[in-house]
Image: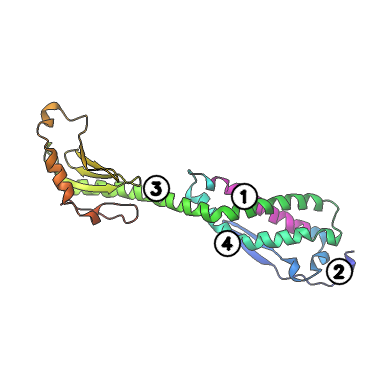
Amino acid sequence: MLSACAGKKPPPPKSATLGETKVEYRDYSLVRGSLCDVDPRRLADEMKKINEVLEQFVSGTEDSVKPEATAEQVELLREGTTALKPVVEAHGKNLAGLRSCGLTKPPFPELAKKGEEAVTSAKARLAEAPDVLAVADKRLAEVKWREESAAREASAKQEWCKPGIAVGSGDLYFSRQNTDGKTQWLFCDGMVVEKTSDGEPSLVIPDSISKKDRRKIQAGRYLESVKSYPAEEIDRVDAPKKTEAK
């Protein structure tokens, strides 16, 4: 049966890169009958390598759908969405053509079985990738913002808060709106004003403040500072900015 297809020149190979892995593949369906003209050993080696790449992609991106996924795992999924789509499609077609070439002896049955499983799993992962990436990108952006926001807070405190500042001073140095909608205004003496997305601002006094010092605290002073603080200078995940005390 192989000789009946002799003379069919296969399409030129294409390459795909995923991370540090590079794989060559062909879509033999582009030249009818060309699959049957390939040396079985070379074809088996080619299909085995593609199976391995798809299996590695599926296993390597398994945790990318989880909330604790790392940036590297997410990036692997992102690369796969563009690099592997044509590989998956071509490999699926080639696997389907094995029987028509009479390639039913080992190692082809096992290669076909593993290949079909790998193609099915890879297609499923690629199909869910857009939604997964959207969620992951948002989460990673929030993680990055929290780290950078903490650095901006520390810088503002160093710039605007004098050493040994007295309780009750009411000097405001930083404000942040967290991803849950709660906004906080931070004061040099340790006081914090908090406001939920649908609530009113309220003063939070740390437990470490003594009874004597609590008498020095005038809640109205802190709440007035909050009212006059520019909304555009509140540190937010969508538009983080360095703030200055007003």
Crowding near the residue tagged with mark 4, few <14, some 14–19, many ≥20 C-alpha atoms within 10 Å: some
Q: Is residue 184 magenta?
A: no
Relative to 245, is 70 on the left or the right? Answer: right
Please state which of residues 22 and 36 is positioned toward the viewer in this rendering.
Answer: 36
User: If you read the primary sequence from the N terminus, does the residue marked by circle 2 or circle 1 appear first?
Assistant: 2
Q: Is residue 232 visible?
A: yes
The three-letter amino acid code for the residue at tag 4 is Thr
User: If you read the primary sequence from the N terminus, does the residue marked by circle 3 or circle 4 appear first?
Assistant: 4
Asked if the residue under mark 4 is in contact with the one under mark 3, i.e. CB atoms within 8 Å, the reply is no
Q: Residue at x 58, y 46 (%)?
A: 62
Q: Which mark is residue 5?
A: 2
Magenta segment: 44-63
Asked if the residue under mark 2 is in contact with the one under mark 4, i.e. CB atoms within 8 Å, the reply is no
Helix, strand or loop at label 1? It is helix
Q: Is residue 46 magenta?
A: yes
Q: Position of residue 199 (x, y in %)?
A: 26, 43
Helix, strand or loop at label 4? It is helix
Relative to 14, is 214 on the left or the right? Answer: left
For disc 3, the marked residue is 143
The three-letter amino acid code for the residue at tag 1 is Val
User: If you read the primary sequence from the N terminus, does the residue marked by circle 1 or circle 4 appear first?
Assistant: 1
Q: Position of residue 227 (x, y in %)?
A: 17, 49
Q: Residue at x 29, y 45 (%)?
A: 198
Q: Residue at x 88, y 64 (%)?
A: 2
Q: Eyeballing the image, is 64 above or below 207? A: below
Corner quadrant of residue 37:
bottom right
The three-letter amino acid code for the residue at tag 3 is Val
Screen quadrant of the N terminus: bottom right
For disc 1, the marked residue is 58
Gap between marks 2 and 1 measured at Cα: 35 Å
User: If you read the primary sequence from the N terminus, does the residue marked by circle 3 or circle 2 appear first?
Assistant: 2
For disc 4, the marked residue is 82
